[in-house]
Image (tube, helix red, strand yellow):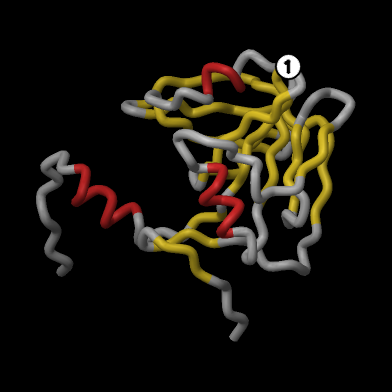
Amino acid sequence: MVELEPSNGDPAQLRRVYGCFPSGVTAVCALDDDTPVGIAASSFTSVSLDPGLVSVCVQNTSATWPRLRTLRRLGVSVLAEEQNKACRTLSLKTGDRFADCEWSVSANDAVFVHGAVAWLDCSIHNEVPAGDHTIVLLNIHALRAEPDRAPLVFHASRFRQLVAV
């Protein structure tokens, strides 16, 4: 029998357990008044094939999400394993988040990070309050993938690489 600790709501306890599940890392970006705006998010997941939906969870304290959520299209870039520096830069609270990052903008003002393994041009389908985060459901309008390249993986509070066995 597996013995479990009672969940006491301690954020450190929850973070330790959540960190046992590896996740990919995405950049969610758009152009706002000719300026790229973006966040890094490791809480990205596929949701539906029909219609094509994905989700990302955004902290309620984010100062960037209120800007992004008003824009027509959002570019979601699934970062590649060598893009940990770009991820850290996109996670900054202050400064130029795009300083070390090459990017392009679509005709719909979605911003995409160069060198990613997948790109999705999305719009907001719905937002669902969930504790200290908001679950954002995104409609997929266009996409591209390079599935033979390895994604950036976040596990146990650090970046890791996938190893084929």
Q: In which quarter of the image is residue 34?
A: top right
Label 1 Cα neighbours within 10 Å, binned few <14 / some 14-19 / many ≥20: few
Q: Is residue 114 above or below residue 3?
A: above
Q: Name the residue under label 1.
A: 33
Q: Is residue 131 left or right of residue 23?
A: left
Which residue is located at x 73 percent, y 54 percent?
116
Q: Is residue 149 above or below residue 10?
A: below
Residue 107 x, y percent position in the rendering = 89, 26
Q: Is residue 52 above or below residue 150?
A: above
Which residue is located at x 83 percent, y 48 percent?
144
Residue 154 x, y percent position in the rendering = 48, 59
Quarter of the picture containing the N terminus is bottom left
Which residue is located at x 59 percent, y 61 percent?
152
Q: In this view, does 115 lie to the left or right of 53?
A: right
Q: Which amino acid does label 1 sit on?
A: Asp
Between 51 and 72, the residue placed more toward the observer is 72
Between 85 and 16, the residue placed more toward the observer is 85
Quarter of the picture containing the C terminus is bottom right
Which residue is located at x 66 percent, y 37 percent?
48
